[in-house]
């Protein structure tokens, strides 16, 4: 058999390792099948309101979206957990995109309406976003003194 290494080609061990690696992975979450815990008409109305909030106020984090949705008085949200569920549902419907800003060892995940959103491109290219590390003016060099033999 080809996966036991008896095929004569000598590559059976690699096939078995590939097979094991393939089946040991977890499947990706199917975000299209997420239940938004609302009737479809209400879910789409709340999603449209959230879409407009994110589009108007630029790329937002989840907690920023929660505060902006409360300020905009979006009806239909029960809790922050419900908001996260709806945002994931919206990502599955291709209404939102999530991207990550890296700065050193810190990451910040932001939600935007389009990947080509001008706010997003400006934020990625600029150096003044909150996670960019501030550059120090000058660094002192520390040199090691060698021990002299007496």
Image: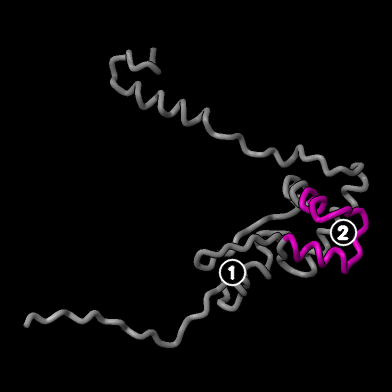
Name which residue lies at 48% across and 81% down.
135
Q: Residue at x 58, y 64 (%)?
A: 101
- In the image: residue 115, left or right of residue 93: left
Residue 113 is left or right of residue 17, and the answer is: right
Q: How is the image coloured?
A: one colour
Question: Residue 77 falls in which quadrant of the image?
Answer: bottom right
Q: To which quarter of the image does residue 28 belong?
A: top right
Relative to 34, does residue 24 appear above or below in the rendering?
above
Per the image, label 1 sits on a secondary structure element best described as helix
Q: Disc count in the image? A: 2
Is 134 placed left or right of 83 in the picture?
A: left
- Quarter holding residue 54: bottom right
What residue lies at 90% left-to-right and 52% top-to-bottom? 45
Image quadrant in which the C terminus is located? bottom left
Say above or below: 138 vs 35.
below
Give the residue pinned by disc 2: 49
Q: Main secondary structure of the magenta part?
A: helix
Report which residue position mark 1 lands on: 124
* Location of residue 111 in the rendering, given as x and y in whole percent from the top left corner: 70, 60
Q: Name above or below for residue 95 compared with residue 112.
A: above
Was residue 38 drawn as part of the magenta stretch in this picture?
no
Task: Give neighbour class at mark 2: few <14, some 14-19, many 20+ (Cα, 10 Å).
Answer: some
| Circle number at residue 66 | none
Q: Which residue sits furthest left? A: 150
N-terminal label among 2 and 1: 2
The magenta-colored residue range is: 62-86
């Amino acid at each position: 058999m080809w996966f036991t290494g008896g095929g004569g080609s000598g590559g059976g061990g690699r096939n078995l390792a590939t097979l094991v690696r393939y089946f040991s992975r977890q499947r990706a979450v199917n975000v299209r099948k997420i239940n938004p815990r609302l009737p479809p008409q209400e879910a789409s109305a709340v999603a449209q309101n959230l879409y407009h909030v994110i589009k108007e106020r630029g790329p937002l984090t989840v907690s920023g979206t929660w505060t902006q949705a409360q300020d905009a008085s979006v009806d239909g949200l029960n809790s922050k957990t419900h908001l996260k569920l709806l945002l994931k549902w919206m990502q599955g419907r291709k209404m939102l995109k999530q991207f990550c800003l890296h700065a050193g060892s810190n990451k910040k995940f932001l939600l935007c309406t389009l990947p080509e959103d001008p706010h997003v491109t400006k934020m990625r290219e600029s150096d003044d976003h909150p996670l960019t590390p501030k550059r120090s003016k000058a660094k002192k060099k520390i040199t090691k003194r060698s021990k002299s033999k007496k």
